[in-house]
Amino acid sequence: MSGFKIIKRADIILIAAIVVAGIWLSAVLILGKSEGQTLRVTVDGKLYGTYNTSIDSTVTVSNGEDLNTFEIKNGRVDMVNANCPGFDCVHEHSIGKHGETIVCLPHKVVLEITGNEKEVDAVAR
Amino acid sequence: MNTKRFFITFTLPVFTGCMIITGCTAKNNPDVPETVAAGSTAVLNEKNTVSAIPAEAAFFAMDTFMTLTAYGENAAAVVQEGESLVNDIENRLSTEIETSAVSKLNKEKTAVLDDDTAHLLEQAMEAWQLTDGAFNISLYPLLKEWGFISQNYKVPSADTINDILENTDLSEISFDKKTNEIEFENKAMEIDLGGIAKGYTSDALIKLFKDKGIASGMVNLGGNVQLLGTKPDGSLWRVGISSPYENTDFIGILTASDVAVITSGGYERNFKQDGRYYHHIMDPATGYPADKGLISVTVISKDAIMADALSTALYVMGRDKALDFWKSHSNDFETILMDDTDMLYVTEGISESFTSDTFSTTVVRK
């Protein structure tokens, strides 16, 4: 009986694996929640930058002479200025939920909210 | 794609699958079938997760921003093909491209059209008749005069508007269905299929998806949304209806599958002159922006071309006429109207699948 081991080497590995997985999963979930939404900005299909919407800031997207300024405030994003002819992007309402976009057609600038929680798959407008 | 989400959706099932296998082996469990079962579950999870990653094409075309999304085998190739299809259609229909079939027609006042364009033109004429003129493809000269094409906005004089309205009677177009020959009897007439081109394009894209074996997908042509099937997990798509107001994101959310969802609103493109706002949805009867008390109109239909035409036409008609129109065509479409008191009117066919957190909703029944 003395040679019988209740805990085998493989079991220790299993327990260790579960603990590691648990810590990793908790970290992912906790960090995921605190990070919130991300604003993804592209110009003519190319990534210009990503911005954390929980940090208030004002950013000017410049591409040659094309300028678009957006403001992040209280988790929402609004285009506040642009030197495009129509100002349609400036007139659009602010965005804050996953899947919402503001588009400046003449400058091919797209502001898109991405994040963990996807409330809608598309926005009809 | 968000890296973290990728980890959760993709890595985690594989990882847990491995753990299940490890667990069984470590215990020296002689129950072999269970081990196999656990292993195959993990493989299945992995497969499901792979197919749940969509292929997407995002690009600018037709003066707007488009995204095509498809799930399944060959999805990446199919959305690429979709993008070239959009470009082909634009080259055929755009009034801003000099060599397009429509531009040539506007210039020469006569043309022999290809089958697709001819068929679309026929549908446009039918929509004009069906809506008692509320949808009209010959308002292009009017939109130019208001500056909605060049974006040099101005309010035209009443005389100018009345003169232009003289050239908007579609019965002055002669069209031979056999030869596809079209002629404007009124030589001042110019047309623009922009009012149904996006519906037509999204219909064509969904057809392409189906032909290529895609069972789940979505096209979003600058806010004109069309859904193919359900989401890969079998759940319905969630479509937010954009709000005209700064402080709310959506009028409400619609859950749906296999339909086009198309919204028209005067808040989308407008300008201000002498303290008044003027928007781009013209009332063909007056030549001025439609002003019948509606703020937003959404049409839901299996037929995207019809949905596109009707979203404009119902906006022009105003609430009462629009709802009467729905009552006599309730098999063909559903609608969500928002009037200038912020009341929503939702037709009974979608009353259970539309929810609004913000606005009061009246269900409209036949």
Image: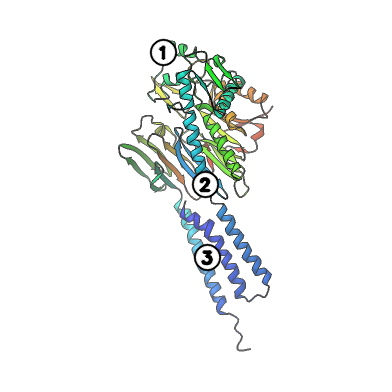
Task: Determine the image quadrant of residue B215.
Answer: top right
Residue position for label 2: B77
- Label 1 marks which chain's residue? B
Image point (53%, 70%), residue name: A17
Where B183 sits versus A122, above or below? Answer: above
- Left or right of residue B275, residue B252 in this image: right
**SS assignment at label 2:** helix
Where B92 sits versus B26, above or below? Answer: above
Task: Determine the image quadrant of residue B210.
Answer: top right
Instruction: Kindly report which numbered mark, 3 or 2, lies closer to the viewer in this rendering.
Output: 2
**SS assignment at label 3:** helix
Residue position for label 1: B157
Image point (47%, 56%), residue name: B4
Residue position for label 3: A22
**SS assignment at label 1:** loop
Q: CA distance from mark 1 to mark 3?
A: 72 Å
Instruction: Kindly report which numbered mark, 1 or 3, lies closer to the viewer in this rendering.
Output: 1
Q: Which quarter shows the C terminus of chain B?
A: top right
**Label 2 crowding class (10 Å Cα cut-off): few <14, some 14-19, many 20+?**
some
- Left or right of residue A109, residue B90 in this image: right
- In the orientation shown, which residue stands out farthest toward the left? A65
| Horizontal and vertical percent position of residue B116 | 56, 29
Number of numbered discs: 3
